């Protein structure tokens, strides 16, 4: 279990907004501005669940502590990540950067986003960031349970060519990216159907 006993620490750098740190033994939540204790507990509970889920399914967990940076606004998220405004989160190395928690909660995607990005942390740490992009994304969609939301957003024609899937996800266009994520999910589901969850672990072991 990830400890829910959090230690709040606020830092004020000259000329900058107040940053709050919430360290746990497994990760540190970094907020650009104040955040409710309830939301911090929510994030910790979701990551606790994500850790159990990923470990149960592929037998892997994070290998070292990581960071979750909660942006203070969509503008900050975009300027820091260079992502388009509609993306909910991104993982760079050991750092997850997400949109403001209240925005993700309003959209009902805080849980999906955190599980998705946590999966990337585990995959990146386990494979020295050498896992193919399409697989990393497909597995993250599989773990997060966001597939029903992606499918409910409209029809799409999934592709199976992994290079095309990567292009779609990186296109910067929302609809194309959605098709890419759905396609990546189906490829991973097919792999699990054929080789089982053990096969997924073996696939990742190739990159360790
Ligand atoms: Zn992703």
Image (cartoon, rainbow, N blue to C red):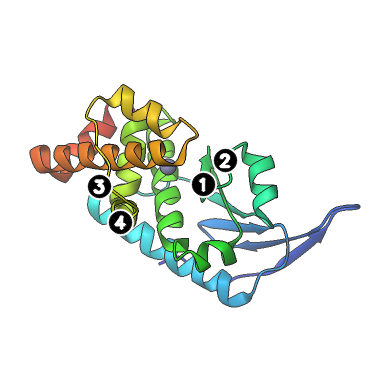
Q: Where is residue 56 in the image (x, y as percent from the top left)?
A: 25, 56
Neighbor class of circle 3 (other Cα within 10 Å; few <14, some 14-19, many 20+) is: some
How far apart marks 1 and 4 lie (CA) works out to 17 Å
**Is there any visible trace of residue 131 in the rendered image?**
no
**Is there any visible trace of residue 39 in the rendered image?**
yes
Q: Where is residue 168 in the image (x, y as percent from the top left)?
A: 38, 31
Disc 3 marks which residue? 58
- Choose between 48 and 132: the one closer to the eye: 132
The residue at 71%/57% (across/down) is: 32
In the picture, the disc for residue 152 is 4
Comparing labels 1 and 4, the label whose residue is closer to the camera:
4
**CB of mark 4 near ligand 1 (< 8 Å):** no
Disc 2 marks which residue? 84
**CB of mark 2 near ligand 1 (< 8 Å):** no
Q: Quadrant of residue 126?
A: top left
Image mark count: 4
The answer to whether residue 156 is above or below residue 11 is above
Neighbor class of circle 1 (other Cα within 10 Å; few <14, some 14-19, many 20+) is: some
Comparing labels 4 and 3, the label whose residue is closer to the camera:
4
The answer to whether residue 85 is above or below residue 152 is above
1 or 4: tag closer to the N-terminus: 1
4 or 2: tag closer to the N-terminus: 2
Q: Where is residue 38 in the image (x, y as percent from the top left)?
A: 57, 77
Neighbor class of circle 4 (other Cα within 10 Å; few <14, some 14-19, many 20+) is: few
Q: In which quarter of the image is residue 201?
A: top left
- Residue at the limit of the structure toward the bottom, as seen here: 38
How far apart marks 4 and 2 lie (CA) works out to 21 Å
- Residue at the limit of the structure toward the left, as seen here: 194
**CB of mark 3 near ligand 1 (< 8 Å):** no
In the picture, the disc for residue 87 is 1
């Amino acid at each position: 279990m990830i400890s829910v006993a959090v230690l709040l620490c606020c830092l004020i750098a000259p000329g900058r907004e107040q940053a709050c740190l919430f360290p746990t033994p497994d990760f540190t939540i970094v907020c650009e501005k104040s955040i409710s204790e309830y939301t911090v507990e929510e994030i910790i509970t979701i990551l606790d669940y994500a850790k159990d889920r990923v470990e149960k399914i592929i037998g892997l967990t994070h290998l070292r502590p990581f960071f979750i940076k909660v942006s203070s606004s969509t503008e900050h998220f975009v300027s820091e990540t260079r992502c388009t405004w509609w993306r909910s989160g991104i993982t760079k190395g050991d750092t997850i950067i997400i949109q403001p928690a209240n925005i993700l909660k309003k959209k009902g995607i805080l849980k999906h986003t955190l599980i998705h990005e946590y999966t990337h942390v585990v995959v990146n740490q386990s494979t020295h960031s050498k896992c193919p992009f399409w697989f990393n994304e497909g597995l993250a969609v599989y773990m997060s349970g966001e597939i029903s939301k992606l499918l409910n957003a409209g029809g799409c024609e999934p592709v199976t060519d992994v290079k095309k899937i990567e292009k779609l996800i990186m296109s910067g266009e929302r609809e194309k990216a959605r098709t890419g994520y759905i396609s990546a999910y189906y490829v991973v589901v097919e792999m699990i159907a054929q080789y089982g969850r053990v096969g997924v672990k073996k696939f990742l072991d190739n990159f360790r």
